[in-house]
Image (cartoon, rainbow, N blue to C red):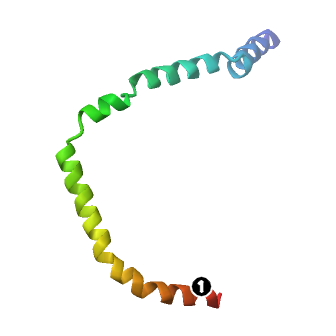
Amino acid sequence: MDTVNDEKHEDHFTRLMFSGKGTHFKEKIIDDHEKQKPSFGDFMAHVNYDELMKNVEILMDSVESFKPLFKKITPIVEKFLKQK
């Protein structure tokens, strides 16, 4: 009787591990996840363009203020890289 129980357990284990039913479950999860993703149009409908433009302007001003620093540090970095 133990061999019958072992065979049933083995068959159950084999079916669980190697039957391929898990791939169907994974595909279903992926499909459900893709359905829940908002589209780009939905995302863009909620964007505050005034805030976005203000932030871009602040970013550009920050880049402009760092340009002199980059001009001063570039020769030092190039010299360091040539030494290696």
Residue toward you, 67 or 36: 67
Of residues 20 and 36, the one nearer the viewer is 36
Question: x and y percent of residue 44 in the render?
Answer: 29, 35
Q: Residue furthest right?
A: 3
User: Compared with residue 48, is residue 71 higher up or lower down, i.e. above or below?
Assistant: below
> Which quadrant of the structure image shows residue 58?
bottom left
List the single residue furthest toward the left. 50
Judge by depth and name the residue closer to the eye, 37 or 14. 37
Return the x and y of residue 69 as percentages of the image width and height. 36, 83
Amino acid residing under circle 1: Leu
Measuring 79% from the left and 13% from the top, which residue is drawn there? 7
Quadrant in which the C terminus appears: bottom right
Q: Is residue 32 above or below residue 63?
A: above
Give how far across and how far down residue 55 sits, in percent. Answer: 23, 56
Above or below, 52 against 74 in this view is above
Residue at point 30%, 28% (across, down): 42
Q: Position of residue 6 (x, y in %)?
A: 77, 16
- Tell me the residue at 28%/62% (across/down): 59
Residue holding disc 1:
81
| Residue 22 vs residue 53, the one in the foreground | 53
Q: Is residue 4 left or right of residue 62?
A: right
Identify the residue shown where x is 46% and y is 20%. 32
Q: Residues within 10 Å of mark 1 (few under 14, many from 20)?
A: few
In this picture, residue 42 sits left or right of residue 73 = left
Image quarter in which the N terminus is found: top right
Question: How many tags in the picture?
Answer: 1
Task: Quadrant for residue 23, please give it.
Answer: top right
Secondary structure type for disc 1: helix
Name the quadrant containing residue 56: bottom left
